[in-house]
Amino acid sequence: MHTVVVGTSGVTASDVLAVARGGARVELSAEAVAALAASREVVDALAAKPDPVYGVSTGFGALATRHISPDLRARLQRNIVRSHAAGMGPRVEREVVRALMFLRLKTVCSGYTGVRPEVARTMADVLNAGITPVVHEYGSLGCSGDLAPLSHCALALMGEGDAEGPDGSVRPAGELLAEHGIRPVELREKEGLALLNGTDGMLGMLVMALADLDLLYKSADVTAALSLEALLGTDKVLAPELHAIRPHPGQAASAANMLAVLADSGLTGHHQDDAPRVQDAYSVRCAPQVAGAGRDTLAHARLVAERELAAAVDNPLVLPDGRVESNGNFHGAPVAYVLDFLAIAVADLASIAERRTDRLLDKNRSHGLPPFLADDAGVDSGLMIAQYTQAALVSELKRLAVPASADSIPSSAMQEDHVSMGWSAARKLRTAVDNLTRVVAVELYAAARAVELRQGLTPAPATRAVVEALREAGVEGPGPDRYLAPDLAAADAFVRDGRLVAAVEKVTGPLR
């Protein structure tokens, strides 16, 4: 099994994906263990002094003014975990919780948190045992980090609360730890707080969304090309010299992908035939500009994610010179903004895809295709309601594009009076990515059927490869009306698991 070694300098996006989705094992580097021990010595020295230090010998948040005596500090650390594990609502997905736990371990191993090595080892042991704490949908304001979600994970380290075992059953966390020979941690000064303060949930969801959207943007380039071909459009607008004049890298990449899919097509360039038109509609002609802007948004979000993956997010931080200083690095604004930005780009990409689908189904704008791509229009409704479903998804995506980060709601007796709402931005982006996949699948379903209905004209080799692979996947072609939901579900799976892009790349080579 693949193993990810956690050091002091952060982790990569591929590390997060390997642990969250691939079940990779986690190990601590010798450097990380040494850094953990060194920072713990600082905390122990401060704990022995009479002067109050935030997070070590005081309360938290609005209660930070109280000095806590040594005999109450272990209780204080337990209590912050128990009281903050206050989430409600549905369970969060297993991959999100594993990413959350792994990223908190990443910060702990930085040597800036004051956590003992044995606590970090227990975190790694829980991940390696396949134990996933139960985390709920609601409870994070994105500042001071993802408090409630992280608290539920810390609670499981203490052997309390519920968790999902490797077999998928939910049981008391203490039972699961015992079965795997893992001793519950007994938290000491600073440790409870260090396990809760971070942007780990929203960051983990950002990393996974970026991976999913990388595939989806390639998929959307493919379906846009298929729609252009099915509408007998011109591929001249995809010429690289035109896109070089407006040098946005994402735009050039999308145009290049579409051009590769359309190479040697016998359908393109017929826009001057029976019903001459000077230009294709914006949804066809401007596909690279819209998808390209989204790709550039992905690039910006990836840069923010890389910075955050290299960061140590905690409050207070234990510095190498022996100071323990309060800060605001837990604030989720940098991550929240790009999560919301991605949701806007996703909504727009879905919107332009739906417009192309609608054009394929409208006999007045499809340039010779049958109404709704039906077999016997009137008797058959064809793909009429498939487009309704796609339109409903697009409408939902527009609502999901409303930025969560533009909101703030004060908490902790006005001590935490401006929050990021980054967790909420991440949760709605996950829904948006799912819905974009469905929208692209509907366009694929319609465009593939439309290409097959262009009898007498030969589609591009890459298009033929897509249609053949789609049919082999059990998605039926043109014909009389049938139960449509299974076909759409199969098309969705075809896009979601990468078979669409794989079918194209067998002909074109790697897409950009």
Image (cartoon, helix red, strand yellow):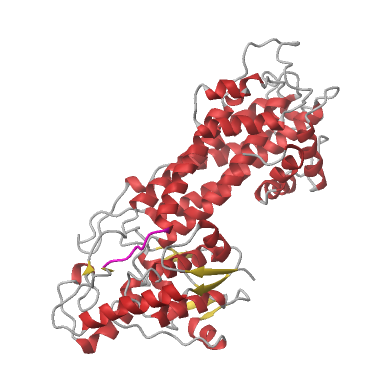
Residue 295: horizontal and vertical position, in percent? 52, 38
- Relative height, residue 388 to residue 304 (above, below): above
Q: What is the magenta range?
A: 310-316
- Relative height, residue 171 to residue 474 (above, below): below
The C terminus sits in image quarter: top right
312 drawn magenta: yes
Q: Is residue 374 visible?
A: no
Instruction: Classify residue 469 as left or right of residue 403.
Output: right
296 drawn magenta: no
Can you tell which quarter of the image residue 43 is in? bottom left
Instruction: Classify residue 277 as left or right of residue 352.
Output: right
Residue 435: horizontal and vertical position, in percent? 57, 46
Residue 227: horizontal and vertical position, in percent? 68, 29
Residue 127: horizontal and vertical position, in percent? 53, 74
Which secondary structure class fits the magenta region best? loop
Q: Is residue 437 visible?
A: yes
- Relative height, residue 286 to residue 182 (above, below): above
Please state the total of marks drawn on the protein image: 0
Can you tell which quarter of the image residue 277 is in? top right
